[in-house]
Amino acid sequence: MDPNPKKILIKVVRLLDELGIAYVLTGGIAVTIWGIPRYTGDADLVVQLRQEDIGRLYSGLEKLSAFGYVDEAMIQDAVLRNSEFNYIDTEGGFKVDVWIPKDTPFVRSCFTRRIRVEIDRYLVWIVSPEDLIVSKFDWWHKGSTKSQYDVRSVMDGQRDRLDWAYIDMWADTLGLTAELKIAKATYGDSLF
């Protein structure tokens, strides 16, 4: 009965770890870790969930909290459509958005390059700052103005530690060079 968002996130990722289901934390919490802290009302997890894991995951999520809500049909639909489902803490109002991605070269690269960071004394798999920037370019391309801020935040937080050759390659591969050019123009030639 703790509405602390970090504790709710940790309960979900601990369950995924116990079930052997690969995941990566992304979204606003990842931006806060790699960039400048900002408010977020949810956690975003990209999860490699197979059809045969749905029942075990649903059962585990149901047992996490007396205040948790998850819908098994929504999990099945998310796996079928490569979309999302939610685990909602109805007491604190915090939700975990669970995204089921298509199997693409970029998604495989994100999972290969994921990094373990400590959150609330638990090691959590998180997207690399470069992959976070590329994924935010994609959301930016789709019209998300918040993603523009997020890109700048991660660039500010990571400055000269980013692998720009990797970012350039994926931006080119995914058709996101316009967003990349705007992001680079924000800093002029000082970082490149």
Image (tube, helix red, strand yellow):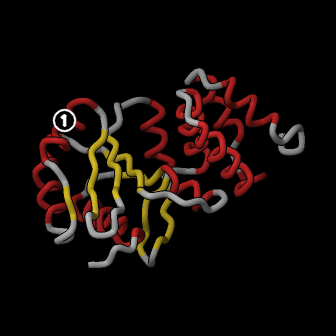
Name the image quarter holding the N terminus.
bottom left
Amino acid at the residue labelled 1? Asp
- Asked whether 124 or 84 is in front, the reply is 84
Of 113 and 67, nearer the camera is 67
Q: Is residue 150 above or below residue 174?
A: below
Which quadrant would residue 35 be assigned to in this image? bottom right
Residue drawn at (44%, 54%), measured in percent from left and top? 25
155 or 93: nearer the eye?
93
Q: In the image, is residue 43 above or below residue 108? A: below
Q: Residue at x 34, y 31 (%)?
A: 102
In the displayed structure, does residue 125 sit left or right of residue 1? right
**Which residue is at 70% across, 46% downward?**
152
Residue that badge 1 annotates: 77
Residue 30 lies left or right of residue 163; in this view the side is: left
Position in image of residue 168 (x %, y %): 68, 31
* Quadrant assignment, res 101: top left
